[in-house]
Image (cartoon, rainbow, N blue to C red):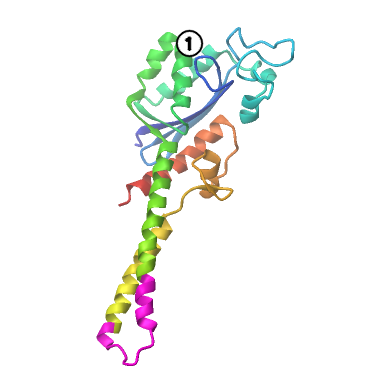
């Protein structure tokens, strides 16, 4: 029987800071160590803090739309009115706990974010809405480690760039021995020498091809990037940006790919 190992998750919020903004949606996918999906869930809630009320000017008083530019709403597409119809945050906390606890196994968190954005919202808001739920939740989450696909992507990207730099050395060797083999000489090179040069050229070419095949940095609009949409585009993974469950789902094949690539010597 597959053992639950990873909890891939993503959150949508009213703004960038867990202490001053609210969690409004969470997507979760649980897999075994081989990335086989064992269960998935999305839960949404309404805004639970008194500060989240409409101001006379028509926009919200908090970071959801403090400047009137609707940045948070533009990111996840959830409007204030839509969120107001969802369940209470305490009910979301209970639903998340029931889902995670149902696997009865310590899970390693896996997410994609700068810093630990998603993790901070998860724990800050569980503590805010249900202190008992926070400690119960922590029982099923490994606090000694986590996996950040963005960190992994940066490591992979760096390795790719390092390999491209290294490939230039092998390209010079290929050119060098190709020149030896094709150079016009007054006296022809000995057959043994031609065989030696050909072998050295083939060896350098094999190393070059291996490096170029591996060195595949993530790009968007021709620029290197480890943003989620850039990685999905590079790996031909469909992303319903930005939906918490969709974002959590795409982390599974990304994490699997990066784990395999970074494990290679």
Q: Position of residue 167 (x, y in %)?
A: 38, 60
Callout 1: 10 Å neighbours few (<14), some, many (20+)? some
Element marked by disc 1: helix
Q: Is residue 187 magenta?
A: yes
Residue 83 versus residue 4 in the image, above or below: above
* Residue 109, picture quadrant: top left
Whether residue 205 is visible: no
Residue 141 versus residue 49 in the image, above or below: below
Residue at the outermost bottom position: 186
Q: Position of residue 7 (x, y in %)?
A: 42, 30
- Identify the residue shown where x is 35% and y is 19%: 139
Side of 99 relative to 264 (left or right)? right
Residue 26 versus residue 62 in the image, above or below: below
Q: How many marks?
A: 1
Q: Which region shows up in magenta?
A: 174-193
Whether residue 70 is visible: yes
Residue at the outermost front position: 186
- Identify the residue shown where x is 53% and y is 17%: 92
* Residue 206, picture quadrant: bottom left
Q: Which residue is under mark 1?
A: 128
For the N terminus, which image quadrant?
Answer: top left
Q: Nearer the viewer, residue 198 or 127?
A: 198
Side of 184 relative to 9 (left or right)? left
- Identify the residue shown where x is 33% and y is 68%: 204
Residue at the outermost left position: 192
Q: Is residue 100 magenta?
A: no
């Amino acid at each position: 029987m597959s053992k639950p190992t990873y909890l891939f998750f993503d959150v949508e919020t009213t703004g960038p800071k867990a202490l001053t903004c609210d969690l409004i949606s969470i997507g979760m996918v649980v897999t075994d160590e081989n990335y086989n999906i064992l269960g998935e869930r999305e839960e949404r809630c309404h805004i639970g803090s008194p500060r989240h009320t409409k101001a006379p000017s028509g926009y919200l008083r908090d970071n959801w739309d403090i400047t009137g530019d609707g940045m948070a709403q533009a990111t996840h597409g959830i409007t204030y009115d839509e969120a107001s119809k969802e369940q209470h945050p305490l009910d979301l906390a209970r639903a998340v706990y029931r889902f995670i606890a149902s696997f009865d196994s310590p899970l390693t968190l896996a997410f994609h974010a700068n810093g630990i954005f998603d993790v901070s919202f998860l724990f800050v808001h569980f503590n805010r809405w249900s202190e008992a739920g926070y400690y119960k939740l922590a029982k099923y989450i490994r606090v000694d480690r986590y996996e950040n696909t963005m960190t992994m992507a940066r490591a992979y990207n760096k390795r790719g760039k390092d390999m491209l730099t290294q490939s230039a050395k092998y390209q010079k060797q290929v050119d060098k021995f190709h020149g030896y083999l094709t150079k016009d000489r007054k006296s022809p090179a000995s057959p043994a020498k031609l065989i030696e040069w050909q072998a050295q050229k083939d060896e350098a070419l094999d190393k070059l091809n291996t490096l170029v095949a591996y060195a595949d940095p993530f790009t968007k609009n021709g620029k290197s990037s480890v943003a989620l949409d850039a990685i999905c585009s590079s790996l031909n993974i469909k992303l319903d940006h930005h939906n918490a469950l969709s974002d959590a789902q795409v982390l599974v094949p990304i994490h699997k790919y990066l784990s395999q690539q970074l494990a290679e010597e």
